[in-house]
């Protein structure tokens, strides 16, 4: 893929909608940029909606397998540490996703495992990065595994293996931006696909073994 097209897609990965000028790479001539923007539309990666640009189904699939570090898609299920941060009263910390796929929707705290990291180390790192809290003195416990596959018609948007971790934090613990404790048994609006099933599993105490969650 041409680097200009990749730049446009990488920019849209972190936004739901963008204006034409918001996706233009620095020091790239307008005509060249417009050509590659149209090519992405022709190839089905992005679409125009109400005068703004957003990712199509094919673009969402790109975002689902996209590596921010490698700057390219990875064609295998992603391995994530998914952390259930509980306040001791059974409420779970829910955050708003800041990138595609499913930007702006509610989700659990999750992050990709780095090389030579254990599941607990990944969970602790994500906990610190996204809440500002310190993991010292807290008990992080891995309790189950879930394989989540999200499809839209014939397109796999997201495919990840979640290694589920639980930690109980004090009631005055920091939550990080765009996050709040919620009762997992209640109807939480705008949950990203698969999160409702994970919360139900947790609320029902079905917290051991392996789980397959497929969303159409």
Image (cartoon, helix red, strand yellow):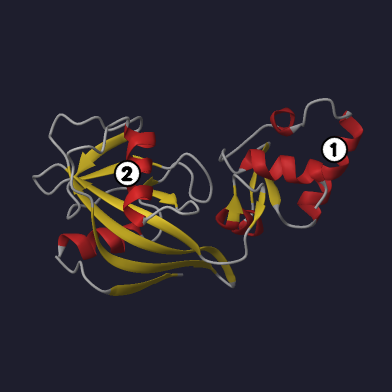
Marked residue nearer the N-terminal end (2 or 1): 1
61 displayed left or right of 120: right
x 38%, y 62%: residue: 162
Work out whether residue 109 can be spotted.
no
Number of residues whose C-alpha sits closer than 10 Å to that of mark 1, classed few (under 14), some (14–19) or many (20 or more): some
Q: How many marks?
A: 2
Find residue 132 and report its horizontal and vertical position in percent.
Answer: 32, 30
Find residue 203 and report its horizontal and vertical position in percent.
Answer: 16, 60
Q: Quadrant location of residue 209?
A: bottom left
Q: Which residue is mark 1?
A: 34
**Which labelled disc corresponds to residue 51?**
none
**Which labelled disc corresponds to residue 124?**
2
Q: Quadrant location of residue 212?
A: bottom left
Find residue 135 and report its horizontal and vertical position in percent.
Answer: 25, 38
x 42%, y 57%: residue: 80
Work out whether residue 30 can be spotted.
yes
Number of residues whose C-alpha sits closer than 10 Å to that of mark 2, classed few (under 14), some (14–19) or many (20 or more): many
């Amino acid at each position: 893929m041409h680097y200009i097209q990749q730049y446009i897609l990488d920019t849209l990965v972190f936004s739901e909608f963008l204006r034409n000028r918001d996706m233009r790479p620095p020091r790239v001539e307008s005509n060249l940029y417009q050509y590659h923007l149209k090519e992405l539309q022709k190839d089905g990666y992005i679409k125009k909606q109400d005068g703004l640009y957003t990712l199509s189904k094919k673009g969402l699939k790109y975002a689902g397998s996209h590596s921010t570090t490698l700057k390219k898609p990875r064609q295998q299920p992603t391995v994530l540490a998914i952390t259930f941060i509980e306040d001791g009263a059974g409420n779970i910390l829910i955050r708003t996703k800041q990138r595609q796929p499913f930007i702006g929707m509610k989700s659990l705290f999750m992050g990709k495992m780095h090389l030579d990291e254990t599941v607990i180390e990944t969970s602790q790192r994500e906990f610190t990065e996204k809440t500002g809290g310190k993991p010292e003195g807290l008990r992080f416990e891995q309790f189950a595994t879930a394989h989540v596959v999200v499809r839209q018609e014939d397109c796999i948007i997201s495919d990840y293996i979640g290694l589920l971790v639980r930690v109980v934090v004090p009631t005055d613990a920091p939550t990080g931006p765009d996050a709040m404790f919620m009762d997992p048994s209640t109807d939480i609006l705008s949950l990203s696909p698969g999160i409702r099933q994970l919360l139900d599993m947790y609320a029902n105490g079905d917290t051991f073994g392996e789980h397959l969650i497929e969303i159409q």
